[in-house]
Image (tube, rainbow, N blue to C red):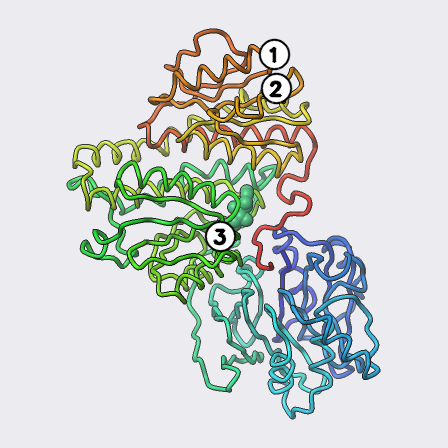
Amino acid sequence: MCGIVGYIGSQAAAPVIVEGLARLEYRGYDSAGVAVMNAGGIKVTKRAGRVKDLQAALPKRLAARIGIGHTRWATHGGATDANAHPHQDASGRVGVVHNGIIDNATALRDRLMSDGVEFASETDTEVLAHLIGRSPASTLEGAVLDALTRVHGTYGLAVMHADYPDRIVVARQGSPLIIGVGDKEMYVASDIAALVRYTRQLVHLDDGDLATVTSTGFRTFTSDDDDTGRTAATVNVTVEDIDDHGHEHFMLKEMLEQPTAAERVLRGRLDERFGTAHLGGLNLDARQTRAIRRVKILGCGSAYYVGELGAGLIEELARVPADAEAASEFRYRNPVIEPDTLYVAVSQSGETVDTLLAVQEIKRKGGRVIGLVNVVGSAIARECSGGIYVHAGPEVSVASTKALTTMSIAFVLLALYLGRVRDLSVRDGRRIIAGLKRLPDQIQEVLAMSDELKEHGEALSKADSLFFIGRVRGFPVAREGAQKFKEISYRHAEAYQASELKHGPLALISPAVPTVAIVPHDELMDRNVGALHEIAARSGPLLVITTADVDLGQPVGGRVDVPRSEPELDPILLTIAVQLLAYHAAVALGRDIDKPRNLAKSVTVE
Ligand code: F6R
């Protein structure tokens, strides 16, 4: 989704900004632009298309040492040069880049137009540029505040003004923004990836924060001009972490990183003596943990499906009622918040606006929320009272893989911990721990099956439409398989509970509609095999993802056997197989694997 980069210091600003924008490409965008400022005023260059198109359009000699840039994902108005950011006011002395959405933009625009203001774009952001330019305030900070008091909506905002050539003013409300601290140079960005090449000293702004950034420092403050005193912290991310290391795609690189990511999420968290997990970050003591009567998990997209897996694990191991819900629905339905429910927000980016707003809704009603989050210091992580960082490392590919795997493992740890505070036996706890310790090697074994899965993926890529089916533990795997498949191959893929087939979708089974069936070795195995035969009897092509000791009764088409783990952990290994399947299908179709059409890495607008 949209990205912001800003620079102020002693170097030429444009190349620094363009490099930062290129690092944000993975988030998804359809146009890009840069504004630089010197004694002569502000010069804007912007283009629909890729960052390299912008780079080609930039004047060769741009010595200005202050500038802002943006990658835009169209919301208000199409992906055109005119709608690309930065936007300016009528005088051309103000430059603005903005992530988020101004909800009352239409009303403000009408009012400005009736005052004679002419608009150069269809965007909500241009409204902000005009409001700032028309403010009578005697400082840039005052003008930005004036404008912000008139808008409703979300923003990560960076503003330059030719009358104040020594500063960039930024503001954050519902859309991430960080300041990077250098040596007599400062940076602004919406995402760490834009800055890691330059600095690891970062300041995270909170909602409601504004900041003045000059080449030598920064000041954070509220809309009442009270200092918020944010300070810089060192982040543990390097350029290496966000490099593709010669892999054809980031998605492939990130899938291959799963064994090490699995080791990281487990490190220091296994207590073999008591058969439990060390999860100090939850900030829950044993009494508070015992008092939990229900667990409600919230996330979006694949994070929601991992939440379904987590809910199943918690019910199974801790015998606490648990369920998962799409955060995007939950936040809109005036949910009942119970004091003895533990709410769990799941998010790779920690920025997904629907999940963040769900967390805020729960907190507003007095509920306790913990987070399962990848990005350290992200908005959701900071909003929660505790949680588990999954330590997957930076994830660049839009399609999430290693972060989801580490989230699944984190849910096993949470379920183990909750279980051992209740009735899960130490023996079962140790059994799960032994399984967890084997997991990184077993993930490696599934990754080594890539060629086999490639053959199946290529065959499946030829179908316009396919089913993924599973039951209970296998169903979240089927959902994730269908999600990955449609996301990156653009084929229609639908997940169904195997148990529900005969209640409707069986009507669609035909030689043209293949089914990928997830069949773990568990107590539902025979029932699953029954469903396979129903499909085979209707000439539906089948690929079964299972383990070697599952007897399918009769040949049912293709099968892929992943290593067997503990029943609670099998879904994690089965998921690695469906990731590879979707990846190879999408490669066979020549899709843009890391940046699938219409999708963004973190969905920070509504
Ligand atoms: C799928 C995918 C998305 C995300 C979802 C939530 O591959 O990446 O469905 O899982 O947008 O994102 P986070 O986890 O950042 O909250």
Identify the residue under disc 3: 327
Q: Image height check: is 45 above or below 317?
A: below
Q: Earlier in the sequence, mark 2 or mark 1?
A: 2
Q: Amino acid at mark 2?
A: Ile
Residue lying at 69% horizontally and 27% vertically, measured from the top left: 464
Q: Which residue is mark 1?
A: 539
User: At which x and y percent is residue 331?
Assistant: 49, 57
Query: Where is 336 relative to 224, above or below?
Result: above
Hey, which quadrant is residue 45 in on the image? bottom right
Quarter holding the C terminus? Answer: bottom right
Residue at the far front: name it.
503
Q: Quadrant of the image for the N terminus?
A: bottom right
On screen, residue 355 versus residue 294, left or right, reads right
Residues at marks 2 and 1, CA–CA distance in whole angstroms = 8 Å
Q: Are marks 2 and 1 in contact (CB under 8 Å)?
A: yes
Which residue occupies the foreground of this view, 132 or 199? Answer: 132
| Kind of element beneath mark 1 | loop
